[in-house]
Image: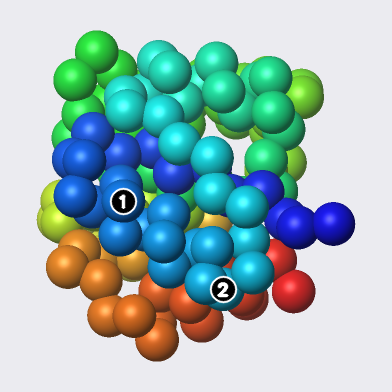
Amino acid sequence: MLKRVLVIEDNEESLSLFCAVLKCGGYEPLHAKNGMEGVKMAMEAKPHLILMDIQMPVMDGFDALRILKSEASTRYIPSIALTSEQLGGGRDGFIEYGFDDYIPKPIKLREFIRIIDKHLK
């Protein structure tokens, strides 16, 4: 069974790229275009991993993460910030906020796959 990865990303080009890379990596990509859609999709589909942009319309990644971590059914799904957003402390800042990891945009393909594999293998 393929592991499901939910990509929450409002930029169509980035979303297409991330989903294509995930498919090539042997994962089943799911997608949502804003934090609110992402929260709903995560609660319904129970993905194995969530990749989340921070700056999005409707609901940003921080608010979406707060909701997902407060729900028993989604609390333990690893969530990775996938963003060009800078947070004080870099990767550590995102981890302190509650994310399990951080992938900076623009992505470096090998690093992208390495971090996803680390959380799913």
Q: Where is residue 63 in the image (x, y as percent from the top left)?
A: 37, 23
Q: Which residue is drawn at 32% across and 28% down?
A: 33
Quadrant of residue 26 within the rendered picture: bottom right
Mark 1 Cα-neighbour bin, 10 Å: few <14, some 14–19, many ≥20: some
Task: Give above or below for 86 relative to 112.
Answer: above
Which structural element holds mark 1? helix
Q: Which residue is drawn at 15% across and 56% down?
A: 84
Q: Considering the image in quadrants, where does the N terminus appear?
A: bottom right
Say whether disc 2 or disc 1 marks the residue closer to the N-terminus: 1
Amino acid found under the numbered disc labelled 1: Ser
Does the image show residue 99? Answer: no
Name the residue that disc number 2 marks: 25
Front position in the image: 101 or 34:
34
Does the image show residue 9? Answer: yes
Name the residue that disc number 1 marks: 16
Check contact, mark 2 vs mark 1: CB within 8 A. Answer: no
Front position in the image: 63 or 109:
109
Q: Distance between the residues labelled 2 and 1?
A: 14 Å
Which structural element holds mark 2? loop
Amino acid found under the numbered disc labelled 2: Gly
Residue 79 appears left or right of 108: right
Q: Position of residue 29 (x, y in %)?
A: 54, 49
